[in-house]
Amino acid sequence: MKVIGLTGGIGTGKTTIARCFSLLGVPIFNSDTTAKKLYDKSEIVSVVTEILGNKILAENGKINKLKMAEIIFNDNEKLNLINKLIHPLVSKKFHEFCSLNNSASYVIKEAAILFESGSYKDCSKILSVYSPLELRVERIKKRDGSTKEEILSRIAKQWSPEKISELSDIVILNDEKELIFPKILEINKKLNKV
């Protein structure tokens, strides 16, 4: 079974692309969603609060992910500590997912930081999604109400679209000018042949 990596910067539309593949019956593993669920586990909450302090806890005792993001995206050392905690756990969940879906022709591993985390090494091919900057900013504003400044700051901390595209086998342009599903059908056909 092949593992196809799906990546791209925030607001490029990775999740939309993944949904299209899912409609074709392709099993999708969303690394970011898996990581978010891990943050709800009490043992993870306790380690994260050791690293970041109790100020990241909401009233219900769970991690306030916005507060956590605010801290770690402004402190590389803390970001690295959190990544060292979470990435191996996400990787373990991914291997369990692959075992459950081993009859599929291929699975997709969706991850915002596929290259940065090193998890691209599990993949036989990499698909990346590219969208113009202004479109990305508008999507993120609609999705989570962030300001343009906050969004641009987060984008600036990610790898450039050029760097991601250069390392990818297939780049999907998601600019809302052309229908995306026909592109996905074509890519699916190629991936099933390989």
Image: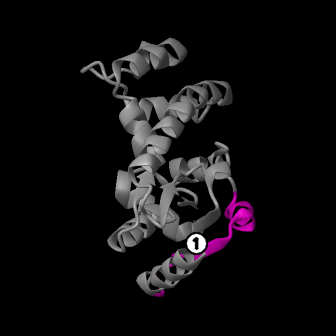
Residue 161 place in picture, x, y as percent: 67, 63
In the rendered image, the vertical position of residue 35 relative to residue 108, given as above or below: above
- Left or right: where does residue 146 sit relative to residue 4? left
Q: Is 87 in the magenta?
A: no
**Magenta-colored span:** 160-178
Residue 88 visible here: yes
The extreme front residue here reads 103
In the rendered image, the vertical position of residue 70 relative to residue 123, given as above or below: above
- Left or right: where does residue 191 sit relative to residue 64? right
At a point 40% along the width and 60% down the height, the residue shown is 27
Residue 41 place in picture, x, y as percent: 35, 24
Residue identified by numbered label 1? 132
- Left or right: where does residue 182 sit relative to residue 162? left
At a point 68% along the width and 70% down the height, the residue shown is 169
Q: Secondary structure at mark 1?
A: loop
In the rendered image, the vertical position of residue 155 relative to residue 78, given as above or below: below
